[in-house]
Amino acid sequence: MTEDARRVAIAAIVRIDEDGAYANVLLPKMLAESDLEPRDRGFVTELVYGSTRMRRQLDHLVDRFLVQSPPPTARAALRIGAYQLLHLDTPPHAAVSATVSAAPKRFRGLVNAILRKVATAVKSGVEFPSRAVELSYPDWLVDQLGADLGAEDATAALRAMNKAAAVHTRADGYVQDPSSQLVAAAVPANPGDLVLDVCAAPGGKSSAIAQRGVRVISADRRLSRAGLIVSNRDRLQLDDVHVVQSDATAPPFRPESFDAVLVDAPCSGIGALRRRPDARWRISGADVAELAALQARLLGAAATMVRPGGALVYSVCTLTVAESVDVVAQTAAELAAQGFREIEAPEGDWRAMAAGVHFLLPSADADGMAIARWRRG
């Protein structure tokens, strides 16, 4: 791989760390502006996503040999060098020399000295002080999933989310993770039914439901995100997906007018961290609590839109009990008063939790997800 590829990776990591740029937004733009060959672009993506995802682990490996924290550009070079040594099949000599060449001249001596020590340490075997450091997650997140899922399942989920997500394409050409496809399939609706998707952008679940001959009202609060639904609908040539900009906490529709309502609520995304390598460093426990409060409001508002005999589906791409079991428990009395009763688990490898919630744990082939379903009597 060229030195230019590593230079692009170093520049991207600095912008992610220092400017707060989102990796999945920044990197495609940087690659589009570069003249790198496709193979080199793939290598840059691996370095940036992998080094960002494994940041805590790599920094621990490097910091043992530093007397003070290095400048951001040197830190980024050390990180991609350590990533190559620990996670890729790059020969140690090549990983060190090529990374040193890609670093700014004033940092090359430092990068060379530290990466040589890292290479020796990796060859001898690396031990980490904690599971959170080894798996490269914040302590609070490892502790939270351990409490919510149990240590064994939490560790398996965290390991799975350290792998890059595979691309899955539906028969109609839309790219969508299998777990999201399972959620769309779990919405009880028949041809001719009217379904409301209250937090629909970018429209993947709406379009999957519409493919079954269902009329879908696809709503989102932000105009820009509603525009994404329109773009995907038009590209898929779907005539019966109707896009509305609306606030799902106060839906502008007649009560009891839909055969099914899907609440695919905004969440912490902790079940889909493999897709956003920097997300684990942005989320906090306070965010989870704030989102759970919003999710309860969304679920309560959506319930009023379901006609008697219709279905209500709640889903989140997270693994926290606070955003799933607790939200359902918090709204249970309200839903029961309106005649809602839990219905059976959907098809797929869903695991029963409490309060009628089912979890799909992340794997090599799918994101983590939680779902609950009701029928209104």
Image (cartoon, grey):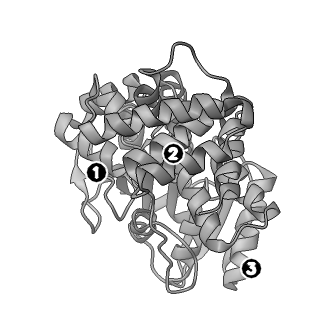
Separation (CA) of disc 1 from disc 3: 33 Å
Does residue 253 appear to the left or right of 142 in the view shown?
Answer: right
Please, is residue 24 above or below residue 284 in the view? below
Q: Quadrant of the C terminus?
A: bottom left
Q: Residue furthest top?
A: 67
Q: Amino acid at mark 3?
A: Asp
Looking at the image, is mark 2 or mark 3 earlier in the sequence?
A: 2
Q: Position of residue 307 (x, y in %)?
A: 50, 60
Q: Residues within 10 Å of mark 1 (few under 14, many from 20)?
A: many
Disc 1: which residue: 358
Disc 3: which residue: 234
Please, is residue 32 above or below residue 80 in the view? below
Total labels: the figure holds 3
Question: Dots 1 and 3: beta carbons under 8 Å?
Answer: no
Q: Residue at x 60, y 39 (%)?
A: 77
Judged from the image, the secondary structure of the residue bearing numbered disc 2 is: helix
Q: Residues within 10 Å of mark 2 (few under 14, many from 20)?
A: many
Q: Residues within 10 Å of mark 3 (few under 14, many from 20)?
A: few
Judged from the image, the secondary structure of the residue bearing numbered disc 3 is: helix
Q: Amino acid at mark 2?
A: Val
Q: Quadrant of the N terminus?
A: bottom right
Q: Amino acid at mark 1?
A: His
Looking at the image, is mark 1 or mark 2 earlier in the sequence?
A: 2
Q: Position of residue 48 (x, y in %)?
A: 58, 49
Q: Position of residue 137 (x, y in %)?
A: 41, 32
Disc 2: which residue: 96
Q: Can residue 300 be spotted in the picture? A: no
Q: Position of residue 72 (x, y in %)?
A: 67, 28
Which residue occupies the foreground of this view, 6 or 33?
Answer: 6
